[in-house]
Amino acid sequence: MLLNPQYIADHNQLRSDSHRSKLSYWANEVEKAEFVIQKLIDFQIAIPSWALGTGGTRFGRFSGGGEPRSLEEKIDDVGLLHALNRSSGAISLHIPWDIPKDVAAIRQQAGSHGLAFDAVNSNTFQDQSDQPLSYKFGSLQHVDKAVRQQAIDHNIEVIRHGEALGSQALTVWLSDGSCFPGQLNFRKAFERTLESLHEIYAALPPDSDTARWKMFVEYKAFEPNFYSMTVGDWGSSFLYASKLGPKAYTLVDLGHHLPNANIEQIVAILLQEGKLGGFHFNDSKYGDDDLTAGSIKPYQLFLIFNELVDGMDAHGMNHATDLGWMIDASHNVKDPLEDLLQSVEAIQIAYAQALLVDRVALEEAREANDVVQAQELLQDVFRSDVRPLVAEARRRAGGALDPLALFRQLNVRDSLIRERGAKTVATGL
């Protein structure tokens, strides 16, 4: 579905007086307002192809209809999101579901929407119908060298697809581990995985003037193996990334931690060590719930961005380009596109708030051991309503002041159902 730019113009015109009123405080009273708006305009959050359809649980999946049936339709859906918010300018593909039949045509289609291709993602956590060997007992860690080689070859194939599309990163997530004590030799599993990752790492494209490929090693504390995960925490991922070389980094998925983990501290240390590669943004109540970003723990999301802004600035990093920013969510009861619009805005709000922290005053409070003042400085910013700044950034970039409202006003989902059918289920997970 293509969005007529006039719809956005009309939508913004109707809301212009109210928006200017809300923005006036920031424009007149806050010195950093223009700085924050420009940072927001530059900041793009990639949409994963697998999040464009309805998610599910082990017990069921309830399609909402009008879901994308092909890679082309997935690109169109991300293009629609980007037209609405001007902050979703990339798509992250998952192989084998998103293999393009015509690379040139796919790149042209993405370009027509203003989209780039973010990290490509491999899948060795499921068996495909055409693969000869099973990943039931692991992939890159498997005791059978032939299974490990199959998983290595798949990852290298994913790199080649990404290279053809203009991507510059590979995300490796492993479900490898064990369900019961005694099942696995931990040391051998670690070494086998490292050997396999070395082979994949060696296949990364060489650096050029325009591209520097990265490997993101994702970790998870639990599931699908509930006794041990071979890459079960940030320390394991950091070890792999350090041993592999300068192109390897840790990827942080907010849902992949044990309850109450201090993710902001993990982020700070990885930044300090130069091994933070990027994020999969979501939220959780109990575990890897893959809920809308900021829907459960908005203060934690802000605190994570507080460490990101502080650490990236300390290392002279570009906020928009030096880390990978991507959503990874599952929409069990929501319209996926509405959920993604909500997540993008929640991420932008947390980022804007972090940009407004008075870092000089915060450091002075820390050095003076003034715990109360340090807390007040953070909470005062967190309690500020920065939505007018986020909306203004969207408006200046050509997006809608209220993307979700316009999405509903235009009855986008009904249009997609009429176009694609009421029983369509998105390809992928």
Image (cartoon, grey):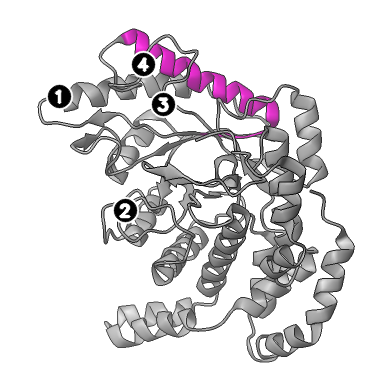
- Distance between the Cα atoms at labels 2 and 1? 24 Å
Viewer-closest of 338 and 328: 338
Q: Secondary structure at mark 2?
A: loop
Q: Amino acid at mark 2?
A: Gly
Q: Earlier in the sequence, mark 3 or mark 1?
A: 3
- Callout 2 touching callout 4 (CB < 8 Å): no
Q: Secondary structure at mark 3?
A: loop
Q: Earlier in the sequence, mark 3 or mark 4?
A: 3
Q: Residues within 10 Å of mark 3 (few under 14, many from 20)?
A: few
- Distance between the Cα atoms at labels 3 and 4? 8 Å
Q: Amino acid at mark 1?
A: Gln
Rendered residue at 27%/58% (across/down):
261
Question: What is the span of residues highlighted in magenta in the rendered image?
Answer: 145-170
Residue placed under numbered mark 3 in the picture: 126
Residue 69 lies within the magenta run: no
Residue placed under numbered mark 4 in the picture: 134
Rendered residue at 27%/44% (across/down):
221
- Callout 3 touching callout 4 (CB < 8 Å): no
* Left or right: 259 as drawn, with respect to 68: left
Q: Residues within 10 Å of mark 4 (few under 14, many from 20)?
A: some
Number of labels in the image equals 4
Q: Amino acid at mark 4?
A: Ser
Q: Earlier in the sequence, mark 3 or mark 2?
A: 3
Viewer-closest of 428 and 137: 428
* Mark in the foreground, 3 or 1: 3
Rendered residue at 29%/10% (across/down):
144
Q: Earlier in the sequence, mark 2 or mark 4?
A: 4
User: Is 164 placed above or below 326 here?
Assistant: above
**Which numbered circle lies on residue 183?**
1
User: Is 377 placed above or below 7 here?
Assistant: below
